[in-house]
């Protein structure tokens, strides 16, 4: 009878592959999140409102990241995944450098679009590789480790951005050969973009793993678009509830994290470098711990016989997250807000490992990357594309006062948090039925 044992722990070639992919994901989040520490300088130099700035942070990145994610994922399901990832890293790194040469809103918007195109190559292919390397039983922890790069990267971006932007602001910018004089935010883009070219070469050292099914057997031939659409249509209730629930978690996450540094700068009067170091260190440590804990808890529940373990784990995280996310921005002092940001970050990260691993166990192997890309399309267009903008719109047009940024963050957290809990609760039973059916068919 077929088994579902993992094909290796987090050691050897599997561990090396996971490490390299995690570093690449870490780098991607530095490049995409660094804007959070540049709100003041970019708004000043380009004459932007909060809403216009949020489009650079969200929609510019998310639009093509989501639209091109699905066709790129089709390549990942049928072509060499490591080469695809390496090409994407090189593209987004060069686009980050080009962001530092922008002289207008339009130029920076276009550069951020290309960053999104490059990053669209990474996660669908990485999830597929991890599933093939670790199998069902070890996948939760492995994807938890991979997903920890989100919070390590955001934390590093806060620290690097705070220190770099403040230092370069004090120095009056930076003058480089060929590029000429760059302002603080422009120079920061150039500095953080260049290391990615080395990481792209490093990824090419990874061998392409054999594609295997849920039961550990060969994945079989590539699937047609009609077969993939047929699968999604036949199981639409599970996928719609799954995608919608995690989209609300992602919206809440971005609505808070995109504006967190500015909350402490604008509302509490902290210095940019100071809050960058404090919030960055906390995000890296607590957020990474939370996403690994979410993956571990999912594996723990699975070993105890819970066939909806990833969804149960994510739901626990959302229930704990919602009150923290509402309260943290509304605290009267910076120290009180920082204390509450610790559990907020822990439970905000908790659902993301289970979100990815849950898709791998309910999706046939030859469509994992493409279904993951559809998932990323929904959650990132909603979360990245609209999360930060939702906060900005409420600040600019509901409260009509930039000094009520904290109220906008609290309101969005309330609405998105409640929606995520209800949707994830609704998907528990249909998810359990689908996974049980797949396991029975595989055996």
Image: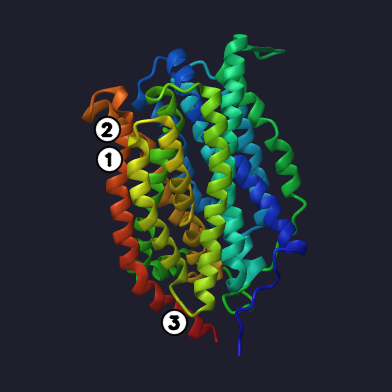
User: What residue is shown with label 3?
Assistant: 437
Query: Does 118 appear above or below 218?
Result: above
The percent coordinates of residue 244 (x first, y second) are 34, 56
217 and 273: which is toward the camera:
273
User: What residue is shown with label 1?
Assistant: 411
Looking at the rendered image, the quarter that the N terminus falls into is bottom right
The quadrant holding residue 177 is top right
Residues at circles 2 and 1 in contact by the CB criterion of under 8 Å: yes
177 and 75: which is toward the camera:
177
Q: Residues within 10 Å of mark 1 (few under 14, many from 20)?
A: some
Q: Residues within 10 Å of mark 2 (few under 14, many from 20)?
A: many
The percent coordinates of residue 78 (x first, y second) are 60, 61
Q: Earlier in the sequence, mark 2 or mark 1?
A: 2
Query: Does 148 appear above or below 54?
Result: below
Q: In the shown orientation, is residue 331 left or right of residue 335?
A: left
The quadrant holding residue 188 is top right
Q: In the shown orientation, is residue 194 left or right of residue 362?
A: right
Question: What secondary structure is found at the residue carrying circle 3?
Answer: helix
Looking at the rendered image, the quarter that the C terminus falls into is bottom right
Query: Does 109 appear above or below 72?
Result: above
Q: Residues within 10 Å of mark 3 (few under 14, many from 20)?
A: few
The percent coordinates of residue 397 (x first, y second) are 23, 28
Nearer to us: label 3 or label 1: 1
Q: Which mark is residue 394?
A: 2
Question: What secondary structure is found at the residue carrying circle 2?
Answer: helix
């Amino acid at each position: 009878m077929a088994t579902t044992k993992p094909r290796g722990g987090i050691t050897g070639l599997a561990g090396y592959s996971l490490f390299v992919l995690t570093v690449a994901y870490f780098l991607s989040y530095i490049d995409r999140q660094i804007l959070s520490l540049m709100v003041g300088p970019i708004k000043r130099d380009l004459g932007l409102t909060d809403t216009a700035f949020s489009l650079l942070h969200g929609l510019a990145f998310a639009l093509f990241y989501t639209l091109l994610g699905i066709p790129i994922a089709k390549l990942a399901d049928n072509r060499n995944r490591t080469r695809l990832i390496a090409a994407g890293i090189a593209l987004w790194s060069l686009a980050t450098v080009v962001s530092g040469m922008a002289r207008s809103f339009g130029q920076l918007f276009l550069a951020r679009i290309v960053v999104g195109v490059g990053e669209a190559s990474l996660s669908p292919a990485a999830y597929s590789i991890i599933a093939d390397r670790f199998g069902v039983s070890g996948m939760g922890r492995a994807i938890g480790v991979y997903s920890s790069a989100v919070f390590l990267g955001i934390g590093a971006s806060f620290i690097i951005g705070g220190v770099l932007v403040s230092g370069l602001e004090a120095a009056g910018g930076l003058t480089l050969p060929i590029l000429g004089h760059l302002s603080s935010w422009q120079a920061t883009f150039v500095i953080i973009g260049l290391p990615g070219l080395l990481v792209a070469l490093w990824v090419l050292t990874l061998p392409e793993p054999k594609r295997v099914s849920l039961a550990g057997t060969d994945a079989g031939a590539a699937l047609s678009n009609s077969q993939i659409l047929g699968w999604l249509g036949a199981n639409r209730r599970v996928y719609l509830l799954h995608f919608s629930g995690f989209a609300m978690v992602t919206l809440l996450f971005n609505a808070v994290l995109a504006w967190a540094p500015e909350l402490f700068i604008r509302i509490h009067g902290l210095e940019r470098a100071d809050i960058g170091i404090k919030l960055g260190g906390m995000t890296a440590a607590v957020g990474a711990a939370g996403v690994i804990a979410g993956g571990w808890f999912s594996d723990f529940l699975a070993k105890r016989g819970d066939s909806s373990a990833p969804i149960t784990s994510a739901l626990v995280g959302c229930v704990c997250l919602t009150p923290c996310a509402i309260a943290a921005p509304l605290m009267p002092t910076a120290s009180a807000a920082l204390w509450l940001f610790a559990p907020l970050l822990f439970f905000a990260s908790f659902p993301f490992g289970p979100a990815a691993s849950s898709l791998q166990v309910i999706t046939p192997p030859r469509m994992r990357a493409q279904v993951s890309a559809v998932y990323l399309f929904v959650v990132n267009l909603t979360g990245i594309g609209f999360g930060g903008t939702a906060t900005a719109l409420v600040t600019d047009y509901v409260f009509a006062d930039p000094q009520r940024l904290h109220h906008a963050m609290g309101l969005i957290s309330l609405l998105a948090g409640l929606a995520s809990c209800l949707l994830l609760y609704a998907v528990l039973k249909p998810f359990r039925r689908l996974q049980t059916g797949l396991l029975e068919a595989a055996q």
